[in-house]
Amino acid sequence: MKKSQKTIFLVFVWLCLVPAVSFAENFIHEELDHLAQVYSGHFIVSTDGKSIIWNDGYAMPAGTLEENKSLQAKIEKPVLVDQVDHVHYPAGVIDLAAYFQKNEDPGRIRYEPFSRKMYGDSENEVRTHLVTIDWMPETFKNADGTAQYHVSVTTVNQVNEKLKQISSELDALVKKEPDYKKYLSDPGGTFSWRYIANTNRLSYHSFGMTIDINVGHSNYWQWNVYSLYQKPSENAIKPENIPGKAIVLVNSKAYFVENHQIVTKNNVNFVVDIILSENQKNQLMQQNTEGEIKRDDSNNALINSIMQQALANGNRPIPEDTSFDYYPNQIPWPIVLVFEKNGFIWGGKWHHYDTMHFEYRPELLN
Ligand SMILES: [Zn+2]
């Protein structure tokens, strides 16, 4: 190649490469700026595209996008840009079954240091921001007229005010649609500093900006394994195979059950992971009424060891890349819309669905 040809060739290569690189960088830059704007109380808006600058001057690194990073890796070891890169949450009423086929989990990849810095880096620090609010006090009352349910939420980002607003909009909604009460009674929980079972990742309930509505009318991908077990696993225990009286471990909890009955809590059919041996049963049989067996120091180690065995037997927790069938959603759209209007995304729009779960993530809705 002549020198002039070589120069032209190199310029051509440069022209091809540069826009692609800067496009990706611009995109990240925009996404980071958007994050800083939505949570503007926490950030110095306008980032350098490589980090996000907190009010105290801390520059949190954005990390770099890796093209071939798997979903599992993004879930388990995200960098900040994984949380925002090409995440499109479809607000409003959508065709859930069609969306499910797309295999998207908008908002499920989260960079934990971001939320720890925003909401609190330890259980105690999160607790210093918590307040208790009445949950739908017009609908759910005690005999003396006081609110039946209370939930703990954070004051960071005025999440408490937003949840109060949601609560009163839902009060108004169930006046028109009394059938919806059952989805909203006995809320499954808000604040709870805990790790997701069998992971080293914090549940987002740890930050006080998340609420589970009634568990009994919800679907969660880690529970819905009957359809999976019909295919591959000989290890699945069918309800009819549970002996007359037994202790079983279900979703990491021990239950005493009788009369071959399917194990239920709030009418949710759980998958039985293991039936205990006679010996194990005797050790745990301190409480012989049907229901969850309380953990205490005397039985905790035993339950833990049995659980490890059970999880291994049942191939659980189910790996992220398992493909499974669409679920029949039970949560009515008007409930979802009230949450979305106030900055909360819904876990029912995740391929790894969790229909009781609502989480304050305004960056995905604005
Ligand atoms: Zn939840």
Image: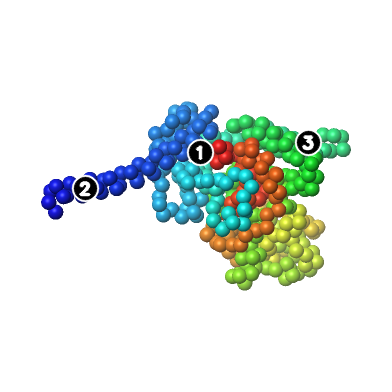
- In the picture, the disc for residue 10 is 2
Which residue bears the numbered disc 3? Answer: 137
Which residue bears the numbered disc 1? Answer: 114
The coloring applied to the image is rainbow
Left or right placement of residue 240 versus residue 301 in this view: right
Question: SS of the residue at dot 1?
Answer: helix
Which residue corresponds to the image point at 73% horizontal and 57% vertical from the top-left? 268
In the rendered image, residue 205, in percent from the top left (x then y), is placed at: 62, 43
* Amino acid marked by disc 3: Pro
Question: SS of the residue at dot 2?
Answer: helix
Q: How far apart are marks 2 and 3 (CA)?
A: 70 Å
User: Can I make out residue 302 in this image?
Assistant: no
* Amino acid marked by disc 2: Leu
Answer few, some or many: residues within 10 Å of disc 3's Cα (few below 14, many 20 plus, some between 14 and 19). some
Q: Nearer the viewer, residue 345 or 117?
A: 345
Which residue corresponds to the image point at 69% horizontal and 66% vertical from the top-left? 275
In the rendered image, residue 49, in percent from the top left (x then y), is placed at: 40, 37
Mark 1 CB within 8 Å of ligand 1: no
In the rendered image, residue 72, in percent from the top left (x then y), is placed at: 50, 54
Left or right placement of residue 30 versus residue 307 in this view: left
